Image (cartoon, grey):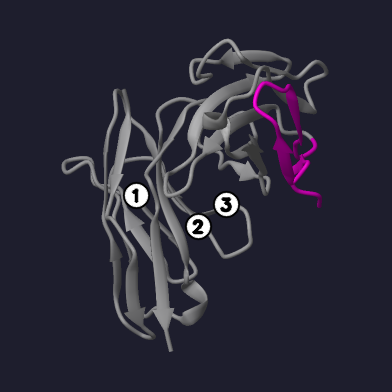
Amino acid sequence: GDSVTQMEGPVTLSEEAFLTINCTYTATGYPSLFWYVQYPGEGLQLLLKATKADDKGSNKGFEATYRKETTSFHLEKGSVQVSDSAVYFCVANTNAGKSTFGDGTTLTVKP
Amino acid sequence: GAGVSQTPSNKVTEKGKYVELRCDPISGHTALYWYRQSLGQGPEFLIYFQGTGAADDSGLPNDRFFAVRPEGSVSTLKIQRTERGDSAVYLCASSEQNYNSPLHFGNGTRLTVT
């Protein structure tokens, strides 16, 4: 079946540091890829998405590029803020129903 | 507008009891999903509805779990003869029909079986 592997956390960074959270997937077919974020005390929400190879999703300074050749969708941000502290989930969806989630990476940004 | 609403937010029940968890999706969203999330793990797919019918229920762990969506809007996840291993956060999400559409999640129901 489909699977998503993301970098284990927790990740702790200082404000303005560069962030990378690695994500790779295995899937039958051609998935759409997403990053979801869960801020403390809130529900899961979409951060960004990419639906085909070489697409770049971006939002709130975060970016991720769909790399079909390496089956990856790494999340990056050039300068993190304290408010970015959250749990980040990489998700692959090869059909309308069954989105497959990674186990999440907890990011803590210190001032 | 209103997001996905789940009730109750917390449910504590004794082993062996029956529970119902409710999900009210975003108006107009035809697709509805149930996921289960255990501590330290990502959400695990349970079941997906397209309209009133269950399009994919392959994630339901066993026949103690059942879900309905009789009018194509509100959905209820039902768990019979609860076990301590059923303790988790149960998440509901809805989306537009297109599989590229993002999932809109509720805040979940935290189920604790004692």
Q: Nearer the viewer, residue B53 or A14?
A: A14
- Residues at marks 2 and 1 on the same chain: yes
Q: Is residue B83 visible?
A: yes
Position above or below: A68 against B77: below
Q: Position of residue A69 (x, y in %)?
A: 16, 41
Name the quarter where the C terminus of chain A is drawn: bottom left
**Residue A86 lies in magenta, yes or no?**
no
Q: Please identify, in this view, whether the residue under mark 3 or under mark 1 is nearer the observer.
A: 3
Mark 1 = which residue? A55
Side (left or right) of A35 relative to B80 = left
Q: Badge 3: how crowded within 10 Å, few (<14), some, or many (20+)?
A: many
Mark 3 = which residue? A44
Mark 2 vs mark 3, CA separation in Å: 6 Å
Q: Give the magenta-colored segment's residue range.
A: B1-27
The residue sitting at 34% across, 57% down in the picture is A64
The residue type indicated by label 2 comes to Val
The residue sitting at 50% across, 19% down in the picture is B61
Task: Output the chain of dot 1.
Answer: A
Labels 2 and 3 touching (C-beta < 8 A): yes
Q: Badge 1: how crowded within 10 Å, few (<14), some, or many (20+)?
A: some
